Image: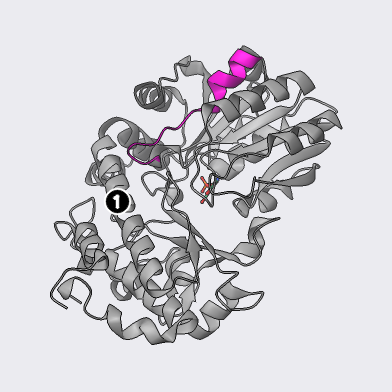
Amino acid sequence: MNRMSNDDDCYLAAVGAGADPSGVPWAELDPAVLYTKRSSIKWARYSADVLPMFVAEMDFAVAPIIRGALQRAVEASDIGYVETPAPYAEAFADFVEDRWAWRLPREYVRLTTDVATGVVEALRLAPKGQQGRLVLSTPCYPGFFEMLQELPFEVVEVPLLDDDTTALNLEAIAREFETGATAFLLCNPHNPHGTPFDANELSALARLAAEYDVFVVSDEIHAPLTHHGATFTPFAPLAADAGALSVTVTSASKGWNLAGAKCAAIVAADDRAHSLLDHLPPEVLTRTSILGVHAGIAAFTEARDWLDLAITQIQANQRLFKALLREHVPAVKYTPGSAGYLAWLDLRGAGLGAEPAERLLAEARIGLNDGRHFGLGGEGFARLNLACAPDTIVQGIERIASLVSPATQASLTNIGGQK
Ligand SMILES: Cc1ncc(COP(=O)(O)O)c(C=O)c1O
């Protein structure tokens, strides 16, 4: 065929100038290369024959600005304890004001080790007698269930509305609030779908929380990765307007791929939440890594261009993945999200039985996150990571196709005329 197919167009667009957002050639991000260089979960969990497309870590190289900030800190031996959130708070507040028009007093920002710690420590402060029932919209980030094991809440799972727009089920949430739920753990943008909830939904949630005195902890770790053309609405200003008690936990760790740097922000929505956060034990701050503080400040202030390039790449990768799926594995359903780099795959029609992720790992040697760990509504699904080189996406499709639709494999070998 002489005509370029849609697959070829999407492939060439994703390859772009041949390098990742840090300017590192795609060939250096080949999984076989990364496997020899990195030791994080993504590269250590499975043997080299498994293509690791699970866990929310990017393959892209760290932003040069952030690498420089970390190098300077190490060269200056500035690797002691953190004393104050102030410089980070300044950088964070400027970023959220510029991106989302969220204006906040700097003292509302506290620091902690990571978002998981921030969520747990914030929920530990739920006003006395409020550690009863906590509502969670599922399917959701599996780490929430692990975090909640550290707390005395009874967890109530309320599935998201089962449509393409992936909305909060406000009616079901309201019923839980009316019947005594005391806390809500919001994930905005939502992991795994990549949905930034819309302002109307979030305002309605804030009003309900105010009416029934429900404490809302909003995990906004994926917000910096909101796609070009999409809108992210921070929950805190809406909570403050509605009079709901709320705390936001977030970090530069997803947007700029800094999970190991260990620094996150716990942010009060208003003065009442700020007073609540005064009760955080001092160790919550001390356990933060100063390297994470340096990296976070560099990210929020000077690495915004890198973030925008990363988002552009993720959107191109999404288009490539969607086109290849449609062409070669149509039995797998996927609706691209508009934040982050995670793809939530509906494998219920793929003929892989009740445990598709396990079969894909065992028989196609591709590591995905098993949908069963995401709570109600996750069965038959798997989550796949698109923050990688375009060729890794092609390899991923080849492996999925080898199990789901083996007849299509051959046509992938010449994609873009380059493979
Ligand atoms: C929604 C969400 N919250 C929290 C985390 C974990 O963040 P941290 O490493 O800062 O604890 C993740 C990681 O993927 C996530 O997706």
On the image, the x and y values in percent for residue 185 come to 66, 38
* Figure check: 416 above or below 61: below
Q: Name the residue under label 1.
A: 62
Q: Is residue 267 visible?
A: no
Q: Which residues fall within the magenta stretch?
A: 226-242
Q: Does the magenta stretch include residue 235?
A: yes
Quadrant of the drawing holding the N terminus: bottom left
User: Mark 1 packing: few (<14 Cα in 10 Å), some, or many (20+)?
Assistant: some
> Which residue lies at the image location 48% right of the left edge and 28% below the top edge?
233
Q: In this view, does 418 lie to the left or right of 112?
A: left
On the image, the x and y values in percent for residue 217 come to 64, 33
Query: Which of the 4 quarters of the picture holds residue 322?
Result: bottom left
* Label 1, ligand 1: CB separation under 8 Å: no
Looking at the image, how many numbered discs can be counted on the residues?
A: 1
Helix, strand or loop for disc 1: loop
On the image, the x and y values in percent for residue 159 come to 69, 48
* Figure check: 325 above or below 375: below
Tag 1: residue type?
Answer: Val
Q: Please say which color scheme the image uses.
A: one colour
On the image, the x and y values in percent for residue 409 come to 35, 83
> Which residue lies at the image location 30% right of the left edge and 35% below the top edge?
298
Q: Is residue 308 magenta?
A: no
Closer to the camera in the image, 110 or 24: 24
> Which residue lies at the image location 42% right of the left edge and 32% below the top edge?
231
Query: Which of the 4 quarters of the picture holds residue 132?
Result: top right
> Which residue lies at the image location 46% right of the left edge and 42% below the top edge?
222
Q: Is residue 6 visible?
A: yes
Quadrant of the drawing holding the C terminus: bottom left
